[in-house]
Amino acid sequence: MVALQNVLSRKIDGEGLAYTREVADATAPIYARMARVVPEVEWPFHAPYIHRINQLKRELDAVILAHNYQTPEIFHGVADIVGDSLQLAREAAKTSARIIIQCGVHFMAETSKLLAPEKTVLIPDMDAGCSLASSITGG
């Protein structure tokens, strides 16, 4: 597993991420899905990132799996598949994408890699942990 920011930072930084007419038009259907949870005043900040991430997913043959607790811009804006950890594990095994980006905790990314060993599995934060999973003992 690789931290997502290591992969995408070179592709997103310095791209001149601006809220242009093109970005506004391309992301209007996405904003319509999340207008009740993201104030309109915040959309010009999120839209350029959402637009660029969605472009990169297509370019890199990637799919984003997002756990139910992700923020609205991730859950509604860039996620291809959403659900609980069991659902995401099942979807990781079925996806034809070359790269799986697991927006969840560490054990979810590990499970995705176990079920799809031929895929590259990325996680946005290598320190994303789960207190319940951490409390399990081998006894």
Image (tube, rainbow, N blue to C red):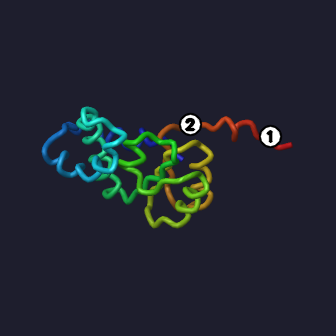
Choose between 81 and 17: the one closer to the eye.
81
Amino acid beneath label 2: Ala
Q: Position of residue 135 (x, y in %)?
A: 74, 36
Q: Is residue 14 left or right of residue 131?
A: left
Q: Position of residue 128 (x, y in %)?
A: 56, 37
Residue ID at (60%, 61%): 115
Q: Position of residue 22 (x, y in %)?
A: 15, 48
Find numbered disc 2 in the image and state the secondary structure of the residue it sits on.
loop
Q: Is residue 131 left or right of residue 75?
A: right
Q: Which residue is mark 2?
A: 128
Q: Is residue 16 left or right of residue 126?
A: left
Q: Position of residue 72 (x, y in %)?
A: 40, 42
Sequence order check: which comes first, mark 1 or mark 2?
Answer: 2
Within the image, what quadrant is residue 133 found in?
Answer: top right
Amino acid beneath label 1: Thr
Judge whether 18 appears above or below 107 on screen: above
Find numbered disc 1 in the image and state the secondary structure of the residue it sits on.
loop
Mark 2 surroundings within 10 Å by alpha-carbon count, few (fewer than 14), some (14 through 19), many (20 or more): some
Mark 1 surroundings within 10 Å by alpha-carbon count, few (fewer than 14), some (14 through 19), many (20 or more): few
- Residue extending farthest to the front is 36
- Disc assigned to residue 57: none
Judge whether 137 appears above or below 102 on screen: above
Question: How many tags in the picture?
Answer: 2
Disc 1 and disc 2: Cα gap in Å? Answer: 19 Å
Q: Quadrant of the C terminus?
A: top right
Residue ID at (32%, 47%): 53
Q: Which residue is mark 1?
A: 137
Judge whether 127 appears above or below 88 on screen: above
Residue ID at (52%, 48%): 67
- Residue extending farthest to the left is 21
